[in-house]
Amino acid sequence: MSSTATSPIRFRVDPANPGQFFACCGLLEMADRLWSEAEGWFDGNTFFIRAMRNTATLSMLLDAAKTIQLMQIETGPNDGENEEDEKSEDAEDHISSLLITAPVSVRLDWWSDRSLKTWAGSMNASMIFLAMCNAIDPAQDDPLNHGTVVFDAAVQDVASRPKRRARNPREPFYFDARRGANALSIDVGFSTDSLKKSQELTTVAYPVVESMCLVGLQRCRPRPTDKPRVFDYFVWNTPISVTVAPVAVSGLAESGSGFRFANAFRTDQKKHKAFNPATPLQRS
């Protein structure tokens, strides 16, 4: 990369939190599409992004993520899916892809891999994603650790006397392992997903993690293991482009530590899952 590149963007990350790790991949994806030729790397508990644009800042990157616009691409039900624990998923099967239309263009459809997908048909992925994006605070210098109760984006009625509709709380995807570790119904005494009115229960989510993890997983996937819904991923310590990142994530770069995590069921209906905290791997 040219010596004219700006000083790198940096922020804290917990590499053992798979949601945070793949959110870093998502932010690198955003940076590359915004400014081109972006590079990213890990150094302990810090993630760095270096872009060619001299004025690139963390605030600009977060502002771009906050203002994402989305289009649903409906292609009909997924007839090829036969995984037993996902038979009851319904509405979401009819929306197999999402397209980010601004400020960058990215097609998202990685959840055809149901073993990695956390949500079921009762959860609207596009509304969750937009709500998480809308809740991003561009002023944060520690974005992956910014937690807040997330609400649906306000909708402006077009009429002679415009008024705003009520904003509903919105639960996350459960990518952030701080949610996954306590997501089992047995831990809280009941299933939060069984509540008919979301206003009855609101909990803190991490909007940058939840939104950018959805983006990051499109290109950078964890490596499946011989156990169902258990995956490995690897950090990397040298600057690489987003096009090379999938190689590093899968452990082929051999430049950083590896981690293993489970996408575990969090309800007794075995529909909704959550990324659990990862444990370090020992390289053979």
Image: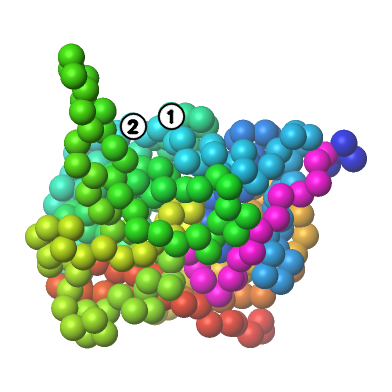
Residue 58 in percent (x, y) is at: 65, 46
Under mark 2, the amino acid is Met
Q: Crowding near pointer 1: few (<14 within 10 Å), some, many (20+)?
A: few
Residue 208: x %, y % from top left: 48, 53
* Left or right side of 94 for 178: right
Q: Is residue 206 visible?
A: yes
Name the residue that disc number 2 marks: 71
Q: Where in the figure is residue 24, as x and y percent of width and height?
A: 58, 56
Q: Which mark is residue 101?
A: 1
Nearest the viewer among 160 and 155 is 160
Q: How many marks?
A: 2
Residue 156's place in the image compared with 219, above or below, is: above
Do labels 2 and 1 touch, CB within 8 Å?
Answer: yes
Which of the 4 image quarters holds residue 51?
A: top right
Mark 1: secondary structure: strand
Amino acid type, callout 1: Thr
Is 27 situated above or below 198?
Answer: above
Residue sitting farthest toward the top = 160
Span of residues in magenta: 5-19
Question: What whole-number distance in Å separates the C-alpha atoms at marks 2 and 1?
Answer: 7 Å
Q: Position of residue 174 (x, y in %)?
A: 35, 64
Q: Residue furthest right?
A: 3
Mark sitting earlier along the chain (2/1): 2
Q: Is 7 in the magenta?
A: yes
Which residue is rendered at x = 47% and y = 41% of the image?
66
Q: Quadrant of residue 265?
A: bottom left
Which residue sits at x=19%, y=36%?
A: 165
